[in-house]
Image (tube, rainbow, N blue to C red):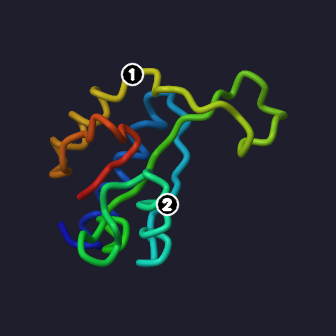
Amino acid sequence: MNRVEFTRAKNNLIAAMILDGEYPIEDYLKRSPEEQNRLFRLGLSKCDGYIIISGHQKGIADDIYFPDLDDIDKDLDKNELLPPKKGWEYWHKYWEGKGGKPMLEWDKGHFEG
């Protein structure tokens, strides 16, 4: 999947989530090798950014999260993140049906083309 195809598929995924009553937020769409390596050194990624390249570096991966919106007046950056209402498996199966890669058990918010 190239970046144009990924962008279309990802936007359709986000739209489907919203239409189904979810409140997705996106994070870390594009990363530099330095940022990828920083996350690798923190143990937050299995890609070092130099030898093992992340889909984020290629612009074909996005992290999608779901904030707790019980108190909408709170700063969204400080809200607890919850699983999606329909579950991670549901949205990853939807994503796979659109040509996306399967869910990473250790990084369920990661959607890659």
In the displayed structure, does residue 83 sit left or right of residue 74?
left
The residue beneath circle 2 is 28
Residue at the limit of the structure toward the front, as seen here: 41
Q: What crowding class fits label 2: few (fewer than 14 Cα within 10 Å), some (14-19), or many (20 or more)?
A: some
Along the line of sight, the residue nearer the viewer: 10 or 47:
47
Element assignment for label 1: loop
Along the line of sight, the residue nearer the viewer: 30 or 33:
33
Q: Earlier in the sequence, mark 1 or mark 2?
A: 2
- State which quarter of the image contains the N terminus: bottom left
56 w.r.t. 17: above or below: below
- Figure disc tally: 2
Amino acid type, mark 2: Tyr
In the displayed structure, does residue 37 sit left or right of residue 95?
right
Residue 40: quadrant of the picture: bottom left
Q: What crowding class fits label 1: few (fewer than 14 Cα within 10 Å), some (14-19), or many (20 or more)?
A: few
C-alpha gap between disc 1 and disc 2: 23 Å
Residue at left 43%, top 45%?
15
Q: Position of residue 51 (x, y in %)?
A: 24, 75
Residue at left 77%, top 31%?
72
Residue at left 65%, top 27%?
68
Q: Position of residue 109 (x, y in %)?
A: 41, 41
Give the label on residue 102, or none.
none
Residue at left 43%, top 68%?
36
In the displayed structure, does residue 102 sit left or right of residue 11?
left
The residue beneath circle 1 is 86
Q: Position of residue 84 (x, y in %)?
A: 46, 27
Along the line of sight, the residue nearer the viewer: 55 or 90:
55
Amino acid type, mark 1: Lys
93 w.r.t. 63: above or below: above
Element assignment for label 2: loop
